[in-house]
Image (cartoon, helix red, strand yellow):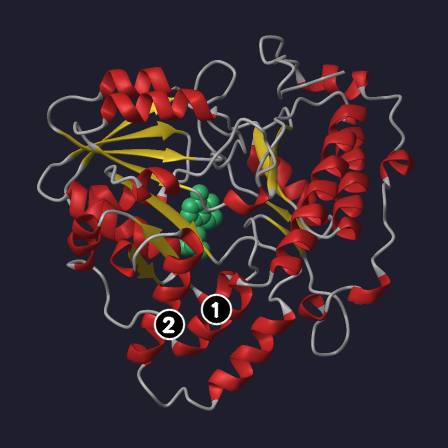
Amino acid sequence: MPYFGETGSTLGGVMNRREWIFRGSTGAAGALLVGATAPATLGWPPAARRMPNGTRADPIRLHSNENPFGPPEGAREAMVRAFDESWQYPSESYPALIEQVAATEGVSPDHVFLGAGSHEVLRTAGTAFGIAGGHLIAPFPTYEAFRSYSMDAGGIVERVPLTSTMETDLGGMEGAVTDDTTLVFICNPNNPTGRVVPEHELRAMLSRLDGRTTVLVDEAYHEYVDHPDYSSCVDLVREGHDIIVSRTFSKIFGLAGMRVGFAIAQPATVQRMMAFRNRHSISSVSIAAARAAYQDTEFVRFSREENAAGRRIVYAAAESLGMEYLESQGNYVFIHVGEPVVNFQRRMADRGIRVGRAFAPYTDWARISIGTRDEMNQFASALAKVADEVGQE
Ligand SMILES: Cc1ncc(COP(=O)(O)O)c(C=O)c1O
């Protein structure tokens, strides 16, 4: 039975806790253990997931949308080499990454802003456009960092709820734009829902807003997307439109702990954000890692495929239990657990698994990050046990 996705939505019929458990009573946990065989060449678990004593990292981390396969081998080697030069300030490392990003994205270097993770992009943009009471617009729920940084700077952020099918409400957001609006924030795919904004609708909206306000499109999960109705907005920056595209090395490139992200924007916008940056916030070791990871297309391909397999395990687990979920384009899946997330978190923690926090107003939905197949199979088994436990209460 299709849930959310291209084929439509079942959100109208929200089930209560008992219904989803009873509907799922035919699903055996064993049937969910899909594709547990690891590619022999890569070693399993990947070196990054082994603790110094050879055991696996514990508990299983399905709460922060990280890439469990990172960092890529080439990035590890680059970090070790860069370590020898870590007594130097990174001022000479920055231009190399800026040029690499510019060449890869087809813009000139003055279109590139580097930040310590995309958090620094969101902070500098949020500050530059929120300062002194700027009016900003964001979906709700979405990734919250941008909003909180804007508010810290004195901005007023108007939140536009998702539609009844939990899609970004582009019409509602456009309708909220006034002559005072300084920036519109769009997260594509959105976090926590994993849903992308249809390309034609987004581009039509952006062309109507052209010249009225700046738009920031957060593409943190860009490399995971395989939806035919999605495209990045970098080409619109290339054409000279007032759009900021934000990207990160924390997700598919497997470098969340190294803190590297970037924005592609008009040179004047880059300068505006530079005024609020933290000079030398990215270490030379991190820059070396990002440079190596960025060109590792094989690692990206492998991570994308494993992520898609992990998502399928979550879909199968939820379907066998009759739980609603959203088909996702990110490295996480939003599922309707039917009880407050705090309870669900505790039940999962008891089984050695950390899951995402609550995203109001969907406080009985949980965001499950995608780990290795083995971890997702363990999640599937735990989910079945949790469903049984809730059913017996
Ligand atoms: C949509 C989105 N944007 C930005 C970030 C921040 O990532 P980082 O600061 O690690 O680049 C995240 C992290 O989860 C995210 O989900």
Give the side of residue 213 with respect to residue 112, left or right: left
Q: Is residue 168 above or below residue 19?
A: below
Nearer the observer, 358 or 42: 42
Secondary structure under badge 2? helix
Mark 2 crowdedness (10 Å alpha carbons): few <14, some 14-19, many ≥20 = some
Mark 1 crowdedness (10 Å alpha carbons): few <14, some 14-19, many ≥20 = many
Q: Amino acid at mark 2?
A: Ala
Q: Residue at x 15, y 21 (%)?
A: 178
Disc number for residue 97? none
Q: Quadrant of the C terminus?
A: top right
Return the x and y of residue 340 as percentages of the image width and height: 57, 30
Give the side of residue 90 with respect to residue 163, left or right: left
Q: Are marks 1 and 2 in contact (CB under 8 Å)?
A: yes
Q: Residue at x 56, y 43 (%)?
A: 356
Return the x and y of residue 155 as percentages of the image width and height: 17, 38
Q: Amino acid at mark 1?
A: Arg
Q: Residue at x 55, y 58 (%)?
A: 253
Q: Is residue 391 above or below residue 103?
A: above
Q: Is residue 22 above or below residue 119?
A: above
Secondary structure under badge 1? helix
Q: How many marks?
A: 2
Q: Quadrant of the N terminus?
A: top right
Q: Residue at x 58, y 8 (%)?
A: 12
Disc number for residue 291? 1
Return the x and y of residue 173 as percentages of the image width and height: 30, 21
| Whole-number angstrom distance, CA of label 1 to CA of label 2 | 8 Å
Mark positioned earlier in the residue sequence (1 or 2): 2
Q: Which residue is mark 2?
A: 96
